[in-house]
Image: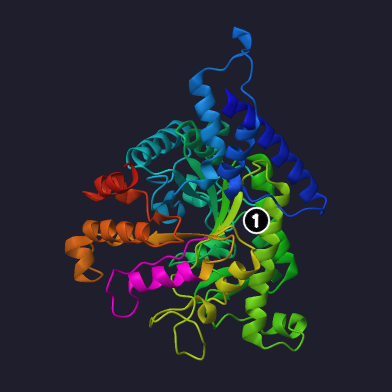
Amino acid sequence: MKKLFALTILFVALAAGIVRYAGGTLPLPDVRKLPQLLKQVEDMLPEPEAQPKAARRSSQMEQTDTGKALQAAAETRALWVATAYAIDYPAEPTADADTLRARCDDMLDAAQAAGINTIYFQVRPAADALYPSKRFPWSRYLTGTCGQAPDGGFDPLACWTEQAHARGMKLEAWINPYRICAGEHAKSDFSSLPDSSPAKQHPDWVVRCDGGYYFNPGLPEVRQLICDGVEEIVKAYDVDGIQFDDYFYPSPSFDDADTYAAHGGGENRDDWRRENVNRLVQAVGETVHRSAKNPVCVFGISPSGIWRNKGVNVFGGSDTHGYEHYTSSYADSLKWIKNGWIDYICPQIYWEIGDEAADFDTLARWWARQVQGTQVRLVLGLAAYKIGSTEYTDVWRTDGCAEIARQLDLAHSIDGIDGCAVFSARNLTATDGLSDVLRQAWTQ
């Protein structure tokens, strides 16, 4: 009972800090220090007198409350649930609420059995929504038709959030900020967008690139749209976080010459593009911390695994030779870390240990050094989708589950790594042995 009193005091103090933060008088309280703060408050309190029976909580409820408060300090054991292209959810587009609800339950049960404690649920794969939004139409990946709602008022984000929490898991809303339509059907998908879509209402915000359609990151109006969309989520749902994935500028060939002429201000064009992304990242982080219904809601980003390659006109890049997001998608993830604009970073280190171009071990240790001395947590993204595939190296084809096990073991051995995330949910049931590997690493 003493722990519950301490926890109540801590929550009151945290709430007061958040109110003062909203007024600009204090920095946001660091939720990662909750375990230490709870212990300090608990030690200062005398043993409470017995309460009347009617006012007592059960020991089970007390443990649940304490566990919820300390979630932020736990090792992240995450799973991505992709909704684009029917990768994970739903199995195929449908408006049937019972089918959608059952699929959610089955997937969360499988995740729980594997020891997973965090779900990254994709709620905006392509300027659309898997929740009733005032700004974005219902996703075609959900019901098959952009703008069509599920039957009976079913709300996938509410369902996933409630059911994840019921299982003691966190649920973060995963957003792709700029993509409108991509892939082989991009042109027809764009044509079929409803008039309510912001892409149809503001065609001057849209750029076609490499066959796809994207919002223009150089426009302040686009940044505001994305921030407003984030605010809509965190105010309405008890989500534990907002996550962006690795898609920013789609390629260096992005046709933004007119926008650059109007807004570039004489800055180098590449630097200007990176600064556009920086402005969005900073603004979204502020939006989450200012507006979230959940006081411990976080903002994280999952970029591709390489910031910059060492020796390519840069000091301090990783000893790798691969796609780098600094120059290819104009994402300066190190700046986000050093400025504390994000709460965690989850680089997608989708190579094996010993890979010649991008060694997992090398990258894991490099990223751990980058977060050292900061308040930003590090979660490593793992490529479970490669297991058994003939499209990748023999390690993944013949020894994929063992490779994931080795990567989990390595992550546990490196200071500064706070957990791992696995892509994606379908592999838990479709890939023999993966669930056992995760359970062994994550339920000990």
Vertical order, 275 against 68 (above or below): below
- The reply to whether residue 334 is in sight is yes
Image quadrant occupied by the N terminus:
top right
Please tell me which residue lies in front, 280 or 150: 280
| Pointer 1 residue | 197
**Percent of width and height locating residue 395:** 21, 67
Q: Is residue 324 left or right of residue 224?
A: left
249 in the magenta segment: no
**Percent of width and height locating residue 290:** 73, 50
Vertical order, 198 against 351 (above or below): above
The quadrant holding residue 413 is bottom left
The quadrant holding residue 101 is top left
Vertical order, 240 against 422 (above or below): above
The quadrant holding residue 256 is bottom right
Give, as a single range, the part of the protein colored magenta: 345-369
Q: Residues within 10 Å of mark 1 (few under 14, many from 20)?
A: many
**Percent of width and height locating residue 296:** 62, 45
Q: Is residue 322 left or right of residue 218?
A: left
Vertical order, 50 against 47 (above or below): above
Please tell me which residue lies in front, 320 or 172: 320
Q: Amino acid at mark 1?
A: Ser
* Residue at screen point 55% across, 42% down: 35
